[in-house]
Every structure is written in structure tokens, then in C-alpha cells.
Image: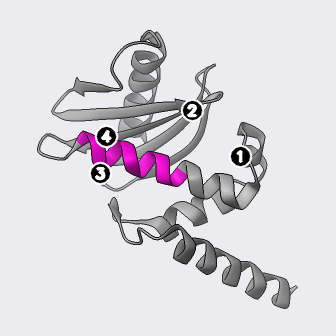
Amino acid sequence: MQFMLLFSRQGKLRLQKWYVPLSDKEKKKITRELVQTVLARKPKMCSFLEWRDLKIVYKRYASLYFCCAIEDQDNELITLEIIHRYVELLDKYFGSVCELDIIFNFEKAYFILDEFLLGGEAQETSKKNVLKAIEQADLLQEQVF
């Protein structure tokens, strides 16, 4: 995976994770272009599209779009499953996640993503193990404060 973007129906970027080195200018250009492209698509259209030399896989959950860029030879269905697994993890942690949870707890959303994905690859497939690691980190954080 090259990157993951989360954005609202209004095109507001809520979370971004880049797994390839790019300049801020290039990231902004890519983000703007992709958000416009995905938002312009009709709901019944396929969740996969070819863009530049990458494949874009996206899925809308409530008011948020989860969008990933993968290389040409990568499997779109696995990427769709990764997006779904991340949403399930967010749901379990926040109890029915919504856009406001990500806005006000973005550091937790990033932490959950980092526990699940490493370098753009799924590092832990077990939801239980990811949630356990997050729980332990929360406990540690509470002990410090």
C-alpha cells in the first residue's frame, strides 16, 4: 500500500498515512486530485479505479471515505478487506465509530492504524490482538498520568 486517506463527503481530509516518501506539495496535489475523483463517482460504481500507475481502492462508511492506493500487482479485494478490518477495529474501540471520533481522537485512530498496518502491510490480522495492544497502551498512558 502506498497510502491511506480518510475524508468526509465534503472533501475534508480527516486522516492520512503515507508509506512512500513524497514532498508535502505532491501529497497535497495527490490528495486534492483523489478526493475530487472519488467524490465525483456515483454510489453504484465500482470501488476500484486505475489512477496514474496505481490502483485506488475506496469504500464509504457513513460520512467517511476510506481510500487506499496500491500497486498494479496488488490484490484489490485484500485491500478492501484491510479497509473493512480497520473500520471494524475503530468500531470496536470507539463503539460505533463516527467522523467526530476521528476528528477529536485522531491520535487514537493513527495508533490503531499503526498497530494494524506497518509499512503499508497488515502486520496483525487478529482484531483481538490489535485491540489488546491498544488496551495495554491505554493502561500505560493512564498510569503515567
Cα separation between marks 4 and 2: 14 Å
- Residue 89's place in the image compared with 61, above or below, is below
Q: CA distance from mark 3 to mark 1?
A: 24 Å
User: Residue at point 71% right, 38% down?
Assistant: 99
Number of other residues with Cα within 10 Å of mark 1, as a class: few under 14, some 14 to 19, many 20 or more: some
Residue linked to disc 1: 97
Q: Is residue 35 above or below residue 26?
A: above
Residue at image point 41% right, 32% down: 58
Q: Which residue is mark 4?
A: 69
In front: 77, or 39? 77
**Is tag 4's residue or tag 3's residue first in the polypeptide sequence?**
3
Q: Compare marks 2 and 1 and give the one earlier in the sequence.
A: 2
SS of the residue at dot 1?
A: loop
As shown in the figure, which amino acid type bears the numbered disc 3? Answer: Met
Vertical comparison of 50 with 113: above or below: above
Estimate the spatial distance between the alpha carbons at disc 2 and disc 1, rounded to whole Å: 14 Å
Q: Is residue 23 visible?
A: no
> From mark 1 to mark 4, how far is it between C-alphas?
23 Å
On whether residue 32 falls in the magenta region, the answer is: no
Mark found first going from the N terminus, 3 or 1: 3
